[in-house]
Amino acid sequence: MRLSLLGLGAFTATSSHVAAFSAARKLQSLRRQTTRRTAPLHKKFTALTMSSNPSALYTPQDIKGWTALVTGASSGFGKALCKATAWRFAELGCKLIIVARRGDRLEALASELKAKYGTEVFCLVLDMMDIEKVERMDQLLPEQFRNVDILVNNAGLALGKNSVEENVTSDIVRMMTTNVTALIIATTLFTKGMKQRGRGHVINVGSIAGHYAYGGGSGYCASKSAVTAFTSAARHDLVGTPIRVTCISPGFAETEFSLVRFEASDNAAAKAKSVYDNLVPMVADDIADQIIYAATRPAHVQIQDIIAWPTNQAGPTNIARVGPSLGAP
Ligand SMILES: NC(=O)c1ccc[n+]([C@@H]2O[C@H](COP(=O)([O-])OP(=O)(O)OC[C@H]3O[C@@H](n4cnc5c(N)ncnc54)[C@H](OP(=O)(O)O)[C@@H]3O)[C@@H](O)[C@H]2O)c1
């Protein structure tokens, strides 16, 4: 990885969830076809993670007892199969609110976290497209979970690789609403309390697409550029407070992301698979580690952005497909 530093219960689905759930169901059959295909490739590498290397000479921030809210916790960076974001916060002793549309996955994750770490977890089944609900997300939480200290705005998606003249309006609205509007509203909602209590951290999952635009990604790049800009502006607003605002901007990371991106295609699974052909991409654990790194810096240190690429990716389209050797002779 090349790095540059610059539940208790689920809510009943409403009619606004129906479209999302049916899209999710369509995806499930595709997802079953991609059972961590590249796992063996990744397992060949035992990466030394940034935050798993404690030093006797430097003291990271202890976030034990803090409440972390992670959106998009049913898959990918939010959840992953072993040690992604929700797991890592639980490991550090945080209380957790995990948010997504697929409540069954949230409940399964909550059970695992409770069994392994005794974590207090609340599952919030919420469609981030339902902006009215996002606006009162705090009221959907039990009293003991309302003081959110760490907000990880991770839920998001890319849809399609259309050229600009062929953009699909509904796709643009979905990307903008989920990736940008909901993220802004959630941040506005929870930073009020953070400011009153004098502690907090907003961690927005952006993308390299928010720094380097590419053809076929006009809607997604626009949404992630907005995340980069919003993160910076929020940091300006909160400069006189202990609240930190960080962006995490990954390159290729293999999750369900590409399956979702190509969900409208007939051959979605094959298209998604081809994205990572003969390349060792990052995985959710790598991004979770960057999130945890930012969250555990001492209180006086604020990470602006972590832009991370797979070793064999140097730009959105500059990819060397050299396989597991990473290009070693
Ligand atoms: N993977 C990459 O290469 C990559 C690179 C750069 C940035 N990112 C960004 O990283 C973030 C996480 O993506 P990922 O790679 O982990 O993809 P993923 O495996 O597809 O996970 C996306 C998560 O977002 C949730 N989500 C999507 N739409 C939602 C909605 N309307 N309401 C509530 N939750 C919703 C999904 O949950 P439900 O479907 O259960 O609702 C899921 O938990 C996204 O913001 C993405 O843009 C990904």
Image (tube, rainbow, N blue to C red):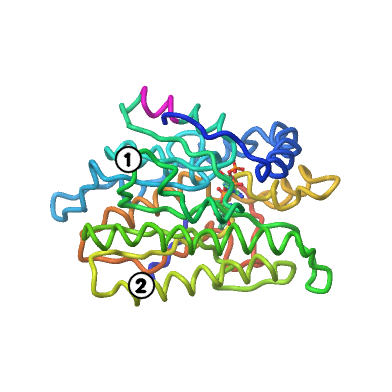
SS assignment at label 1: helix
Asked if ligand 1 lies within 8 A of label 2, the reply is no
Examine the structure image and report whether residue 139 is included in the region drawn in magenta: no
Left or right of 201, for residue 86? right
Name the quadrant of the C terminus.
Answer: bottom right
Which is more toward the observer, 157 or 53? 157
Examine the structure image and report whether residue 111 is included in the region drawn in magenta: yes
Residue occupied by mark 2: 235
Q: Residue 113: percent from the left, percent from the top?
A: 39, 29
SS assignment at label 2: helix
Which is more toward the observer, 107 or 190? 190
Label 2: how many residues lie within 10 Å, few (<14), some (14-19) or many (20+)? some
Mark before the other along the chain sequence, 1 or 2: 1
* Tag in front: 1 or 2: 1
State whether the magenta stretch is mostly helix, strand or loop: helix
Please tell me whether residue 211 is drawn above or below residue 45 in the rendered image: below
First to last magenta residue range? 110-115
Q: Residue 146: percent from the left, percent from the top?
A: 33, 46
Asked if ligand 1 lies within 8 A of label 1, the reply is no
Left or right of 71, for residue 22? right
